[in-house]
Amino acid sequence: MDLFEEYGLTRVINACGKMTHLAGAIVLPEIAEAASESLKHFFVLDELQAIAGKVIAETTGADSGCVTACTAAGITLGVAASMTGNDLAKVWQLPDPAGMPHRVLIQKGHCINYGNPITQSIRLAGATAVEVGVVNRCTPAELRHELARGDVAAVLHVESHHTVRYGWVGLPEIVQLAHEFDVPVIVDGAAQDQRLRQLIATGADLVLTSAHKYLCSTTGGIVAGRQDLVEAVSLQNRGIGRPMKAGKEAIVGAIAALKYRQQQDLHAWTAEQDRKVALVVERLKDVAGLRLSVDPDPNGCPFSRACLTPDPQVTSHSAASLRDALAASDPMIVVRAHHVDEGYIHLDTIEMTDDEIEFVCRRVREVLGAEQRQ
């Protein structure tokens, strides 16, 4: 069945990466098979979640875990859990926070929007988002001051390239500070599933990541962390978490993805990504007015991206116009354009085949006039 032909959908070459607005990752066959099999059966969902918790613990080093609808849901439910604990009456009381700790601290440079404002995800639980510091500076002293004021339910820390990349307090120090005041730390690591063990090892109480990014699973969020808080997250399904619940295909998909990750040769995977990035550089290295570089993932995940910086004086194109010209292609080429205002774009090759890389590079050459100059 050709869904594009059936519904008149736009065909896309994903040179942007594991992005929700492009429908997440291509689900690996082994994971798709498990998720598809789940659709044929009934389950006691609590049993499925219990199995997921064991697998999450085995693969991350956490006490336990559960599966939510997505990472954004995990943020809201993690905040709610830090407010209610395992008190069902409090779960039913939300989003009214009366009588509960309700202030959630977040460094101002972490107040990002990658689909919706992260502070809104906090407020959905009935909590109050407290932005600490300024955009390019937050100090331990400011965090300590807010912690000492009391009524703090949690500190939310974001591990993402979207955050301001300097002037903030790192996760290990955040954990140390928060734990001095018996306050849990929740880590938004939506695209950091390859670093889950590292993030858990900091002592963070809950670490959240997406199943549908580098784990290549069906849409879902993975919550890993402290046993009592994971249980409190699960309990939210009887309250505000009801519209954020994970279905059987999400839970089974996440289990299959984590088991696949256990036996995956990550070094070989990284080598394959390096090969594809090198192919881009090779195909574009002779384009006049185009500066190329290979940029490692800013959060330390084991892969790189090709960076393209066009010189408008030579190519007659800015990064923005190059992005737009590629998007007008058929199929549509979606590049990683987070830094377009700074004059460059990235080609993320993880979801691209060699044929797609060849097509994209040919289009870049055409747009920048390299073919006509030959």
Image (spheres, helix red, strand yellow):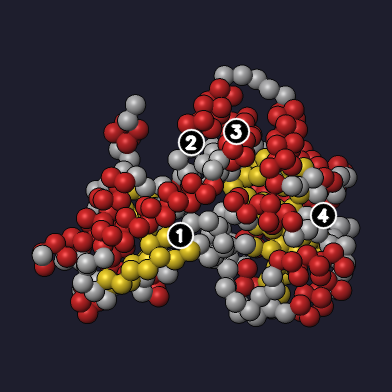
Rendered-image quadrant of the C terminus: bottom left
- Mark 3–mark 4 contact, CB under 8 Å? no
Mark on residue 28?
Answer: 2
Residue at (68, 56) in percent of width and height = 198
Comparing marks 2 and 1, which lies closer to the viewer?
A: 1
Instruction: Point out the tag, 2 or 4, that comes first from the N-terminus.
Output: 2
Position of residue 167 measured from the top left corner of the image (x, y, whole percent): 63, 79
Query: Tag 2: residue type?
Result: Leu
Query: Tag 3: residue type?
Result: Ala
On the image, which quarter does residue 295 sit in? Answer: bottom left
- Measured Cα–Cα span from mark 1 to mark 3: 26 Å
- Mark 2–mark 4 contact, CB under 8 Å? no
**Residue 354 to residue 110: above or below:** above
Q: Which residue is mark 1?
A: 304
Query: Tag 1: residue type?
Result: Ser
Q: Which residue is mark 4?
A: 83
